[in-house]
Amino acid sequence: MKHYIIPIFVPHKGCPHDCIFCNQKRITGQYKDIEVKDVYHIIEEHLKTIDRKNSHIEISFFGGSFTAIDLEKQREFLEVAKKYVDMGMVDEIRLSTRPDYIDREILDNLKNIVLKI
């Protein structure tokens, strides 16, 4: 079984810093903020290239600190990703964050967002 990652880049979203060694916009080549329609488009384009039968697929939110993004925006992005999990087209969702933006309250928030969708 092959593992595929569908990368959704949210450069500098949520991160309170703009460190010289971590220029997410330059690293990703993405200079505009991502919107929900972009998340759909990226997922659809990647799924066209993957043989679902023999694969494990994850949608991964990279760059920035996902758990520091505005809660409503987190919900919007996760809602899109969860639709694909619920349809059986994707197996899991991953997100990146800074260690100082993850705690019990944030984890409960994420859990509630995903369960309510």
Image (cartoon, rainbow, N blue to C red):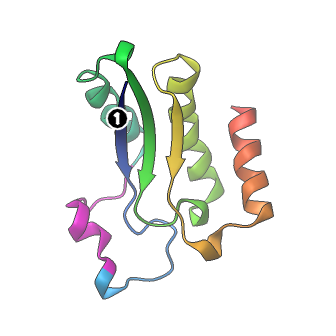
**x and y percent of residue 49 in the render?**
23, 23
Question: Was residue 58 drawn as part of the magenta stretch in this picture?
Answer: no
Q: Residue furthest top?
A: 53
**x and y percent of residue 55 in the render?**
38, 23
Q: Nearer the viewer, residue 47 or 71?
A: 47
Q: Nearer the viewer, residue 3 or 86?
A: 3
Residue type at mark 1 is Tyr
**x and y percent of residue 91 in the render?**
51, 28
Determine whether, in the image, residue 27 is placed left or right of residue 18.
Answer: left
**x and y percent of residue 36 in the render?**
44, 41
Q: Quadrant of residue 67?
A: bottom right
Looking at the picture, does residue 98 appear above or below residue 52?
Answer: below
Callout 1: SS: strand
Question: Was residue 30 drawn as part of the magenta stretch in this picture?
Answer: yes
Give the residue drawn at x 52%, y 68%: 14
Residue at mark 1: 4
The total number of labels drawn is 1
Looking at the picture, does residue 56 appear above or below residue 6?
Answer: above
Q: The C terminus appears in which quarter of the rendering?
A: top right
Give the residue drawn at x 58%, y 51%: 74
Give the residue drawn at x 27%, y 68%: 25
Q: The N terminus appears in which quarter of the rendering?
A: top left
Q: For the residue carrying disc 1, how many other residues have a C-alpha within 10 Å: few (<14), some (14-19), or many (20+)?
A: some
User: Magenta residues?
Assistant: 22-34
Looking at the picture, does residue 53 appear above or below residue 26?
Answer: above
Determine whether, in the image, residue 73 is placed left or right of residue 20.
Answer: right
Q: Residue furthest bottom?
A: 20
Determine whether, in the image, residue 32 is placed left or right of residue 17.
Answer: left
